[in-house]
Image (cartoon, rainbow, N blue to C red):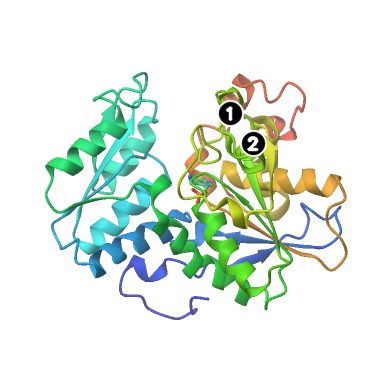
Amino acid sequence: MKHKNQVFDNVLDLVGNTPLIKLNKIASEFKGNFYAKVESFNPGQSSKDRIALYIIEQAEKKGILSPGDTIIETTSGNTGFSIAMVSIIKGYDCVLAVSSKSSADKIDMLKTMGAKVYVCPAHVSADDPRSYYQVAKRLHEEMKGSVYINQYFNELNIDAHYKSTGPEIWEQTEGKITHLVACSGTGGTISGTAKYLKEQNPNIKVIGVDAFGSVIKKYHETREFDKKEIYPYRIEGLGKNLIPGATNFDVIDEFVKVTDEESAHTARLIAKTEGMFVGYTSGAVMQGIKQLGDEGRFKEGDNVVVIFPDHGSRYMSKVYSDKWMNEQGFFDSINEAAIQNIEYIK
Ligand code: PMP
């Protein structure tokens, strides 16, 4: 843990060593103990700080990067924010090629963090020269001394979690962890953490959480890339329409799939029961726990660790907006008390 009265040199000293916090209410109907690794305690408020810092420092060690060079990535999400943050402190230029689907808030946030943002048309195919993949590739080729992070296909993404998240959880649970349940996007978090934990104790069960509309679960079970699994869904950061090279399928025992709607309600429930304001995929991972718990998969004495990847403030116009929830039809079946929780005094 970070020390209470410590003074830090800069924000990067605060990356990692996030707290493991007991979940006292939300899973109390199930046997076993449940703990959350709360990654919003990172200075960039997500687990992506770990990979941004690690990958950039590895490039420095290899002599690929020196101050003034450029770091390139294709994301408007947490990874983009973390890379921008690390770039500021270390003196790099940060270039992010993002989709025109990205919200104005996200683009403003990245610009605020000093990144140069290329907004690329969302409707073009991945091999179109205007797509954000191709724009990033072109910029990387044109800019001497640039590094392309490429988180979905970069093995260092796994390594970052193998070296930090895994050992932290092992120490925090004093080796008593029995289950790891985590979302899989690039797969870096679950793969690196699981690899470390299974090296310590091969009996630890590792369960990935995937989205309906993503190919990951089926691929894990069949090693078949089934295009029929793909359809649009709303949760960001979870699942994928391709097989990420940064996922080590061999260290994951199984996957559960969750819906947009149930994950959204569960995210809101985490705030109301545990007082933790966390992101949409934290709702997804707890929804996974609920489904596993309903199947009677946990027993007395189990120590189940879930990873909450980021902070709720990034979802104010989505999961935490009653208007958005209503527009998605998510209030149709569950008329949450939240919508009556506000009174306007005239
Ligand atoms: N949750 C959120 C909010 C994310 O941004 C990501 C990263 N895409 C994940 C979960 C999944 O983490 P990973 O990419 O390491 O699988």
Q: Is residue 31 depicted above or below 230 in this figure?
A: below
Q: Position of residue 98 (x, y in %)?
A: 32, 34
As rendered, which of 286 and 292 lies closer to the eye? Answer: 292
Q: Position of residue 178 (x, y in %)?
A: 74, 66
Q: Which mark is residue 341?
A: none
As rendered, which of 230 and 302 lies closer to the eye? Answer: 230
Residue under label 1, please give it: 226
Left/right of residue 111 with respect to residue 270 in the rendered view: left
Type of amino acid at the residue the image marks with label 1? Asp
As rendered, which of 195 and 341 lies closer to the eye? Answer: 195
Left/right of residue 62 with respect to residue 227 in the rendered view: left
The residue at the point 49 percent across, 80 percent down is 3
The residue at the point 31 percent across, 65 percent down is 58
Left/right of residue 152 with respect to residue 310 in the rendered view: left
Q: Is residue 346 visible?
A: no
Left/right of residue 205 with respect to residue 344 in the rendered view: right
Q: CB at mark 1 closer than 8 A to ligand 1?
A: no
Question: Mark 1 and mark 2 in contact (Cβ < 8 Å)?
Answer: yes
Q: Position of residue 286 (x, y in %)?
A: 70, 48
The residue at the point 83 percent across, 62 percent down is 32
- Asked which secondary structure carries label 2, the reply is helix
Q: Which circle's residue, 2 or 1, is located before the other in the chain?
A: 2
The residue at the point 84 percent across, 68 percent down is 301
Type of amino acid at the residue the image marks with label 2? Lys
CA neighbours of label 2 inside 10 A, class few (<14), some (14 to 19), many (20+): some
Residue under label 2, please give it: 218
CA neighbours of label 1 inside 10 A, class few (<14), some (14 to 19), many (20+): some
